[in-house]
Structures are given as structure tokens and as C-alpha cells.
Amino acid sequence: LQLQRALLPARLPGIEGLPLAARYLPAGAPDQIGGDWYDVIPMDGGVALVVGDVAGADLAAAALTAQLRGAVRAYSLEGHSPAAVVTRTNEFHLGLDTGRLATLAYALVHPIERIITVVRAGHVPPLLAAPNHEPCLLDGATGPPLGVRAGELWREATTQVVAGSVLALFTDGLLRSLGTPADILGDATAYARVMLVASPAVFLFLLVTSMM
């Protein structure tokens, strides 16, 4: 568990107008190593919220987790668009020749404009909860997991949100706590319900932001 936590941010950055919270809970034994990870990357005018999941539960998965997190951070700080970050990370991943797949959800948030741009590489969609509205899934842009093939291009989906909205990114371990992802896929209300009652004995990466 200590090694797993060393692959995650030591602390979340302070972003004006964008309160953040993250939670990590292991699914199996406390000393089990997994490939789930998250990151928060402040940039000019916005912040990237990233959650990923590498296939496997061993040291190789942990090593790939560190490499992918570093690649996503580097490409983000170079100023690439969300889709370009994911595309470049896929090429980087293929170059490592690990034979493993990895999923990724990347959300670029502009807190002042309250605009969110999402790209997904085989990952479960983020959940958006807005005041006086039913929760919804930001599932408009998706593509295959990282590591499937070279030359893949991902699409972006941009959403304008109202003040007080909450965005949650997570891995599918959260969904498996009450059933398989297919059981509730496409049901945003069910997603929200899972978050409220999920067992602590799951792999859970929950990254939440509330836009002022």
C-alpha cells in the first residue's frame, strides 16, 4: 500500500474556485499493488483532472502506472489539447511494449468559465451533478483503451456547467462494489447512488471538484 500511495500525488494543489478532494481505498489486501491512479495538473487558465487504470495487480502494473502518469503530466504541461495528450500518451505507452492495456479519463476544467473538456480512453465516464438537475454522465467522447493500436485518435467533448456543480472521476472498482459496470452503465442516478453506499473494500479513486 505504501508503494501504491507513492505513485499518487502527495497532496492536492490549491485551485482558486475549484475545491478538490481525492480518496483511495484498496479492494484487496492492504499490501496488494494495483494499477489505479489519479493526478491533478494545474495549468494556465485551467486544471487537468486525470484518473487511470492499468491492467494487472503486480509490480509491472505499478511501474507502468508511474510511467503513464509522468507522460500525461509532461504532455499536459507542454500545452497540448486533452485529445492530443491522450493520443501522445497512447504512442508513448505502445513504445514501452508492455503488452498491457490501460484506461484513462482526462478532464480539463476551466473554473472561471465553468467549462469541462473530457476525453476517455476506455474508461468509465465521469459523473456530473449540478444543482436542481439530475446527475448525468459525461460520456460524449470515448475511444479504445491505451495500448490497443498505434495511430489512434481520440475525440473531445466540452460541457458548460452551472455554478455549484460537482464532477467525480473514478475507476470501475467503484462500480464493482455493488455490481458489474454493465449493470448500471448509462444510469447516472445509479452511479451517484453507488458513490453514496460503496463498500470501503474496493479500489476507489474518487476525484471531486465543485465549481464555484
Image (cartoon, rainbow, N blue to C red):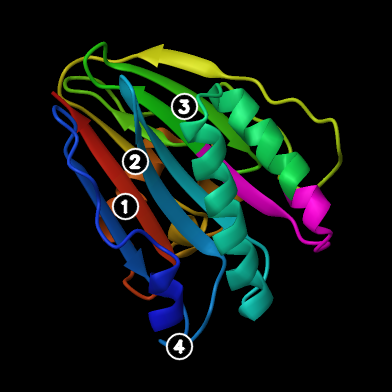
Residue type of the residue flagged with mark 4: Ala
Residue depicted at 44% across the width and 31% down the height = 107
Residue type of the residue flagged with mark 2: Ala
- Image location of residue 23, percent across then percent down: 29, 60
Tag in front: 1 or 3: 3
- Image location of residue 186, percent across then percent down: 52, 34
Indicate whether residue 103 is drawn in magenta: yes
Cα separation, mark 2 vs mark 1, equals: 9 Å
Residue type of the residue flagged with mark 1: Met
- Disc 1 element: helix
Q: Sequence order check: which comes first, mark 1 or mark 3?
A: 3
Residue denoted by label 3: 138
Q: Sequence order check: which comes first, mark 3 or mark 4?
A: 4
Determine which of the numbered discs, if any, sits on residue 195 in the image. Answer: 1
Residue type of the residue flagged with mark 3: Leu
Residue denoted by label 2: 168
Residue denoted by label 4: 29
Q: Sequence order check: which comes first, mark 4 or mark 2?
A: 4
Tag in front: 2 or 1: 2
Cα separation, mark 4 vs mark 1, equals: 21 Å
Magenta-tinted stretch: 93-105
